[in-house]
Image (cartoon, rainbow, N blue to C red):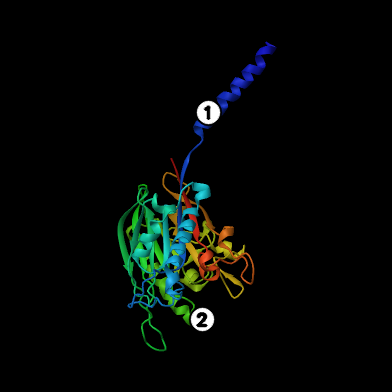
Amino acid sequence: MKKLKHPLLVLFILVLMSANAQEKKKYKIHTVAFYNLENLFDTINDTTKYDEASPIMELNESLRAEAYVKKLHNMAKVVADIGHDDTKNTPAIIGVSEVENRQVLVDLVNEPELLKKDYGIIHFDSPDKRGIDVALLYQKALFKPIDTSSHELLIYDDSTRERVYTRDQLLVSGELEGDLIHIIVNHWPSRSGGEARSRFKRVAAGKLNKRIIDSLQSIDPYAKVFSMGDFNDNPTNNSMKKELKTEADKEDVKLKGIYNPFENQYKKMGLGTTGYRDAWSLFDMILFTQPLLEKDYSSFRFYKAGIFNKSYLTNKEGRYKGYPLRMIDAGLSGGYSDHFPVYVYLVREE
């Protein structure tokens, strides 16, 4: 009998391992991201826009084409890398800002790093005085748009009474592998003239954003809504905390509430997506509504949020060491954007 004990023990362990393997759940994971592409302009002077101030247009005409090709390649490399280490795929959905027109997006998604992913493009021209827009790129095999709309931000300067022309907010509703989600892509008014003086513009943008979210939740309180973009405000500013009423901790988010997974990264960890005057700001964020926090993984739920700040995206020396490496700083040899991208992972049980 003693000789049988060891083989029986091994058999018993193998049976347990087999049962556990069968019970182990498998999950599908996708990346949803946002990236400010910092002046993705073409080489053509558009007289209807103020594109002369773009870094490419400031170059000698003989160098513009080379710079544009390099810019496209660098932007495509970053987009392809976001989330790839974990998902082995490029983002299923990515919002972008600071693009001049639809054609630069067509050129971007046809770069070798992205071409095989067959990205669709959703873009509207906005009334921004610089001629820059927001847009959404999506893998056609994964996301199916149902409805798209552009929402105009109407604001006026108190001193001049003139309209401030800025970016519209893009709303896209569609199905991510059968799950209905809504995405708002933003690029809120800048801090030009100072944070306090320009604050009313971003407060107005926050009010518009909340109205869009409220309209979706009035139809379905359990709507899965993402609001992503370069908000030109930090997670703790009034536009976030008072207008959108964002929460930093999951347990505080009620139905119809909004979670900001980047608030604690900013407050407790000191992280940022862009640097200015020797200080970090976390202007780029992805916010979302409470149903994405639930624990029923029969549909896509939030798993993780992060800032994509790999080493190759940063300055290696000088005053701005560690800050985003801009193309304007690196010249034709490299450089990317003055913002790091941000992302969230969504998971669903297979």
Q: Earlier in the sequence, mark 2 or mark 1?
A: 1
Would residue 258 be seen by someone viewing this image from the given angle? no
| Closer to us: 131 or 347 | 131
The residue lying furthest to the top in this view is: 1
Q: Is residue 27 something one can see in this rendering?
A: yes
The quarter of the picture where residue 171 lies is bottom left
Q: Position of residue 339 (x, y in %)?
A: 51, 66
Number of callouts: 2
Label 2 – label 1 distance at C-alpha: 61 Å
Residue 153: x percent and y percent?
Answer: 36, 74
Q: Amino acid at mark 1?
A: Ala
Looking at the image, which residue is at 49% across and 58% down? 78
Q: Dot 2: what SS?
A: helix
Image quadrant in which you'd find residue 13: top right
| Disc 1 packing (10 Å; few <14; some 14–19; many ≥20) | few
Give the side of residue 225 with respect to residue 330, left or right.
left
Judged left or right of residue 315, residue 35 is left
Q: Quadrant of the C terminus?
A: top left
Residue ID for mark 2: 196
Q: Is residue 6 left or right of residue 213?
A: right
- Residue 222's x, y, as percent? 39, 55
Specify the amino acid type for callout 2.
Ala
Of helix, strand and loop, which one carries label 1?
helix
Question: Residue 96 in the image: x percent, y percent?
Answer: 42, 63
Mark number for residue 179? Answer: none
What residue is drawn where x is 37% and y is 47%?
A: 177
Are there few (<14), some (14-19), or many (20+) residues within 10 Å of tag 2? Answer: few
Say if 87 sits above or below 258 in the image.
Answer: above
| Residue 19, disc | 1
Q: Is residue 160 above or below residue 152?
A: below
Residue found at the far front of this picture? 62
Determine which quarter of the picture holds residue 66. bottom left
